[in-house]
Image: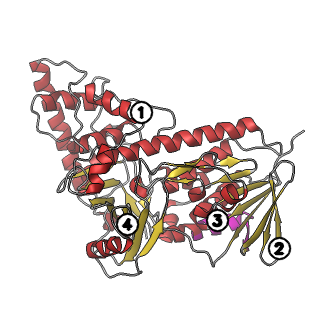
């Protein structure tokens, strides 16, 4: 009979390692099981992923973390979405909120009603009907009003935070619940000669960490999942060609805004992430088009505020591990795969990887059925996210550089092509299993890139159109007036201290 797993070893700290340690310490509470984590202070972490999607709130809630404590300890700010500048064309701008638009009318899609009016010359912009977007672009923030009873005030939010402080915060949480941390470097990995399962990690000073389940959080090195188990990596750089990033931190030159900013540039895009105590800045680019030094120079010209760190270049290959769970090893974070940080999904993928492990948690027999299902779901999730990111490049109308001309002309995955063509027809939104970004997000992208359906599904008479226009004008006015009740973002943060 299979027995419960009793020894879990995590290789690597950072955000991925300590998220795994914290989640496992909560999951195994009251059970006869130990969690050990080994990391080395001599090995740095990537640690630039400071923007998140709303799922991070639920991760913290599952741990029982107090939001005020989290915000204080990680120097967090709120995030209502992402502003995209110069993506559709130079000088253009649009916003991707964590919220829907308007409210259903007679049980039917608001977007379809807006589209019917838009086709008749209605001038109200889609973004005017999203309170979250209007709050963000006016620098305001307030917690959603769950008691209002109107969808107009229903929106989600995420955070910007200091990833190294978050790892420190979760380390305290995990160690308080019995997780043991070991400082040291790995000298070798010992496997079972018959099964190939990992048996133990041997540190450089001779200490031995035996385990039954191993979690690889060793970053791009993939010490266990790749170097030991030789798990193949599926390269997606033909669809997502950016392969480099340069990052630096600066002082805040202005009050932090409640959104991430992404600005398309010569061979990729610039990010700006505002925290309470500083700003994170970076340039994600393809080194086939510009040099690293050119990218550094570009970033330094475009940041505001005094530099706190020197620019650091990071190399990566977009793609996914074909099995994030191989034998008795589960890879999380960069060891599992990497999709460029365009929609802030890196930390989210750590979280959902942990969820897949906990939802398919094995006994000592390591059921192949559990492992295979977790792997299937993980690959689907990465593929759906990949397609969402590809859309950002494919739909651009920039033609000023070779990079933008090339990404617009590339072939795209068939399922993404089907999604776009179906939407172009009448605004229908195809949904596939394991979609991270739901209908409102796809509508934001389509609208921002001026992909407007040929015709709406609704057929309305002249009287209906006039009545609908009046209804939408009232919605727009209600949203505009609602801004006056929300404080400026930095003022709201000050109330949490």
From the image, which quarter does the C terminus lie in?
Answer: bottom left
Distance Cα–Cα, label 4 vs label 3: 23 Å
Helix, strand or loop under label 1: helix
Magenta residues span 168-182
Marks 1, 3: nearer the viewer? 1
- Residue under label 1, please give it: 414
From the image, which quarter does the N terminus lie in?
Answer: top right
- Residue under label 4, please give it: 493
- Residue under label 3, please give it: 173
Marks 3, 2: nearer the viewer? 2
Of the numbered discs in the image, which one, if any, rests on residue 207? 2
Distance Cα–Cα, label 4 vs label 2: 46 Å
User: What residue is rendered at 22% in x and 51% in y?
Assistant: 398
Marks 4, 3: nearer the viewer? 3
Residue 41: name its quadrant: bottom right
Marks 4, 2: nearer the viewer? 2
Q: Which callout, 4 or 2, points at the residue further toward the start of the chain?
A: 2
For label 4, count other residues whose C-alpha is less than 10 Å away and answer few (under 14), some (14-19) or many (20+): many
User: What residue is rendered at 50% in x and 60% in y?
Assistant: 67
Residue 316, x across and y down, in percent: 49, 61
User: What residue is rendered at 78% in x and 53% in y?
Assistant: 30
């Amino acid at each position: 009979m299979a027995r419960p797993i009793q020894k879990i070893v995590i290789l690597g700290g950072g955000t991925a390692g300590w998220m795994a340690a914290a989640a496992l310490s909560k999951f195994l509470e009251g059970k006869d099981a130990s969690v050990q984590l080994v990391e080395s202070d001599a090995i740095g972490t990537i640690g630039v992923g400071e923007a998140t999607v709303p799922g991070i709130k639920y991760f913290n809630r599952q741990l029982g973390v107090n939001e005020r404590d989290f915000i204080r300890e990680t120097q967090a700010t709120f995030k209502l979405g992402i502003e995209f500048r110069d993506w559709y064309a130079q000088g253009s701008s649009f916003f991707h909120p964590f919220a829907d638009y308007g409210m259903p009318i007679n049980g039917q899609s608001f977007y379809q009603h807006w589209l019917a009016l838009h086709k008749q010359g209605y001038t109200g912009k889609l973004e005017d009907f999203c309170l979250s977007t209007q709050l963000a672009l006016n620098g305001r923030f307030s917690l959603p009003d769950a008691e209002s009873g109107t969808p107009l005030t229903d929106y989600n939010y995420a955070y910007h935070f200091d990833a190294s402080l978050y790892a420190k915060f979760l380390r305290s949480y995990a160690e308080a619940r019995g997780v043991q941390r070991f400082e040291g470097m790995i000298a070798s990995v010992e496997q079972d000669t018959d099964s190939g399962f990992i048996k133990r990690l041997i540190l450089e000073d001779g200490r031995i960490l035996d385990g039954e389940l191993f979690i690889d959080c060793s970053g791009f090195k993939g010490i266990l999942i790749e170097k030991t188990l030789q798990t193949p990596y599926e390269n997606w750089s033909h669809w997502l060609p950016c392969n480099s990033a340069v990052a630096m931190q600066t002082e805040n030159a202005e009050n932090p805004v409640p959104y991430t900013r992404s600005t398309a540039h010569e061979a990729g895009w610039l990010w700006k992430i505002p925290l309470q105590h500083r700003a994170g800045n970076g340039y994600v680019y393809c080194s086939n088009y510009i040099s690293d030094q050119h990218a550094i120079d570009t970033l330094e010209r475009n940041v505001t505020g005094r530099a706190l760190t020197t620019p650091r270049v990071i190399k990566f290959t977009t793609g996914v591990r074909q099995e994030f769970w191989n034998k008795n090893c589960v890879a999380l974070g960069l060891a599992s795969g990497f999709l460029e940080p365009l929609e802030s999904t890196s930390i989210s993928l750590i979280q959902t990887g942990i969820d897949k492990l906990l939802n398919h948690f094995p006994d000592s027999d390591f059921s192949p059925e559990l492992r295979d299902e977790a792997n299937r779901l993980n690959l689907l999730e990465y593929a759906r996210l990949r397609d969402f990111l590809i859309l950002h490049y494919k739909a651009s109308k920039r033609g000023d550089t070779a990079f933008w001309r090339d990404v617009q002309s590339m072939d795209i995955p068939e399922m993404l092509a089907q999604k776009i063509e179906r939407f172009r027809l009448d605004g229908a939104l195809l949904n596939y299993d394991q979609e991270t970004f739901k209908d409102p997000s796809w509508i934001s992208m389509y609208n921002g890139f001026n992909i407007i359906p040929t015709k709406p599904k609704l057929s309305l008479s002249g009287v209906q159109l006039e009545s609908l226009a009046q209804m939408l004008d009232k919605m727009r006015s209600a949203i505009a007036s609602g801004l006056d009740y929300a404080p400026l973002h930095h003022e709201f943060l000050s109330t949490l201290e």
